[in-house]
Structure formats: C-alpha cells, structure tokens
C-alpha cells in the first residue's frame, strides 16, 4: 500500500467522520486486542488521526480498516 493511498484514506475519513472529540491514543489503544502490535503504517495512522482529532470510535475504525487492508494486500 502506498503512502499516498493512506493519506487519501485519512482525508476521506476526515471529511466524512470528523468530530471535535479528543481521545488520547492510550485510551484508544487499550480497546484493541492485546495481540495487536502496531507497525510503521498503523503508527502513522494513529499520529495522523490524532492530528485530525478523530474520536475514539473513528480512530478504531481507521486502525481496524488499516489492519484489514494490510492483512490482505499483496506484498
């Protein structure tokens, strides 16, 4: 997956699901399965989601979508 695609994906979520709620990354990460280990791509999504002030549910949607895409994307 290219970096430009990940940025377009985040901007799409930003335009459609942007909220004013500010949720700490630690609280959002606590809701993830303990086996979840962020890679470089997911960490960049977390940082950008924090910058875009996405709410907890939206942040988890981004992380879930990201892990789903990475899991099924060709190497």
Image (cartoon, helix red, strand yellow):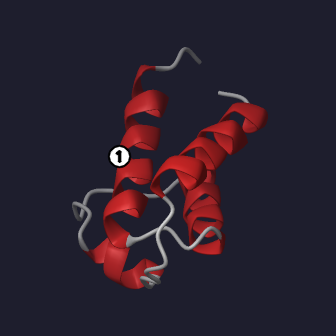
For label 1, the SS is helix
Q: Nearer the viewer, residue 28 or 38?
A: 28
Work out which quarter of the rendered image holds the C terminus and state it.
top right
Q: Which residue is situated farthest in the top direction here?
A: 74
**Relative vertical location of residue 73 with respect to residue 15 in this rendering, above or below:** above
| Residue 67 placement (x, y as % from top left) | 41, 40
| Residue 33 placement (x, y as % from top left) | 22, 60
Q: Which residue is situated farthest in the right direction here?
A: 4
Going 36% across and 51% down the picture, which residue do you hit?
61
Q: Residues within 10 Å of mark 1 (few under 14, many from 20)?
A: some
Q: Nearer the viewer, residue 48 or 37?
A: 48
Going 40% across and 40% down the picture, which residue do you hit?
65
Q: Left or right of 26: which side holds 33?
A: left
How many numbered marks, from 0 up? 1
Choose top left, top right, bottom left or bottom right for residue 52: bottom right
Going 45% across and 29% down the picture, which residue do you hit?
69
Going 65% across and 63% down the picture, which residue do you hit?
48
**Relative vertical location of residue 16 with respect to residue 9 in this rendering, above or below:** below
| Residue 28 placement (x, y as % from top left) | 35, 74
Work out which quarter of the rendered image holds the N terminus and state it.
top right
Tell me the residue that label 1 is attached to.
64
Q: Nearer the viewer, residue 56 or 19?
A: 19
Q: Left or right of 55: which side holds 47?
A: right
Q: Left or right of 31: which side holds 52?
A: right
């Amino acid at each position: 997956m290219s970096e430009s695609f990940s940025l377009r994906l985040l901007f799409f979520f930003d335009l459609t699901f942007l909220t004013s709620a500010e949720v700490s990354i630690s609280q959002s990460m606590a809701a993830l399965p303990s086996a979840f280990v962020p890679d470089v791509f997911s960490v960049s999504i977390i940082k950008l989601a924090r910058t875009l002030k996405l709410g907890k549910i939206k942040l988890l949607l981004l992380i879930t979508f990201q892990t789903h895409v990475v899991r099924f994307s060709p190497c």
